[in-house]
Image (cartoon, grey):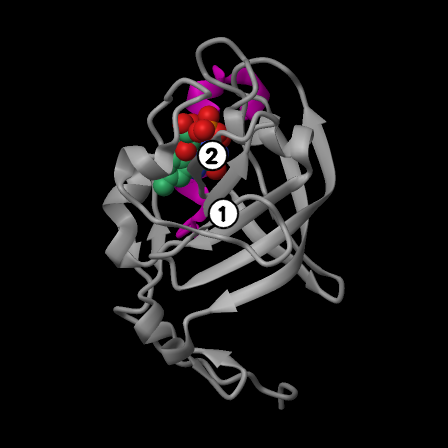
Amino acid sequence: MKVEPSSLEWKDAYKLLIGSILPRPIAFVSTLSKDGAANLAPFSFFTGICADPFLVCFAPMRKGTDGEKKDTLRNIEETKEFVINIVGEKIVNEMNDCSVDYPPDTDEFEKVKLSKISSDIVLPPRVKESDVQLECVLREVLHFGEHPGSGSLVIGQVVMVHVQDQLYREGRINTEMLQPIGRLAGQSYTRAAADTFVLERRKQLS
Ligand SMILES: Cc1cc2nc3c(=O)[nH]c(=O)nc-3n(C[C@H](O)[C@H](O)[C@H](O)COP(=O)(O)O)c2cc1C
């Protein structure tokens, strides 16, 4: 089977996208509106870019209903700051409940009963129940349309990394304790630390 994505309705192209690229980590992004309302939402189009500078990126799509920007993107463009809270299994339900399209002034922290904790450098609060939190300053936003199905790429420079003390040993984060969650297609998830194997990297092929 082969298919040109441009020949598909965007919802069908989207199914191929999320069915091909998986498992995906989840950025649980906290932001503030310019009026100071806190917002929290999950995004699985998320990855790191490089270590020096320490850059990460995630991609909010336009709303499927009307092509409007999601609150997270609007807040980041207005305030230039955000926090990426890493999602472990213990907050997976709260994360899921934050994906509801609430009105812009809804405080999702209060809605799902997660605790705010002040950031060191940026204004948006961190999620206390998340074991790794990345304070980010906006570096760049790239836009790829304004219609349903289109989206943007948000690139952030991480200015502070917070890791719970018990997870942090000799400069590394303990994966088993972090219990990271990966998103699959549809409403399926995977426990990323549950079924792992080691593949040694060879110096060269003989
Ligand atoms: C696990 C998960 C991953 C998601 N990933 C994305 C994503 O990568 N891009 C996106 O636009 N929406 C994604 N969503 C949907 C958003 O979380 C949802 O549209 C949310 O309401 C946006 O909130 P906001 O308007 O407060 O920014 C995801 C939802 C879930 C549950």
Dots 1, 2 in contact, CB < 8 A = yes
Q: Secondary structure at mark 1?
A: loop
The answer as to whether callout 2 falls within 8 Å of ligand 1 is: no
Report the magenta residues as a range. 1-27
Residue 115: percent from left, percent from top: 34, 49
* Residue 2 in sight in this render: no
User: Where 167 sits versus 37, above or below?
Assistant: below
Q: Residue type at mark 2: give it.
A: Ala
Res. 125 mark: 1
Q: CA distance from mark 1 to mark 2?
A: 8 Å
Q: Dot 2: within a 10 Å radius of its alpha carbon, few (fewer than 14), some, or many (20 or more) residues?
A: many
Q: Quadrant of residue 178?
A: bottom left
- Queried whether the magenta region covers residue 10, the answer comes back as yes
Q: Residue at x 59, y 45 (%)?
A: 123
Q: Residue type at mark 1: give it.
A: Pro
Res. 182 mark: none
Q: Is residue 139 left or right of residue 145?
A: right
Q: Is residue 3 left or right of residue 203?
A: left
Q: Residue at x 38, y 56 (%)?
A: 128
Q: Residue at x 49, y 43 (%)?
A: 29
Which residue was labeled with disc 2? 38
- Residue 165 versus residue 63: which sits nearer the camera? 165
- Residue 137 versus residue 125: which sits nearer the camera? 125
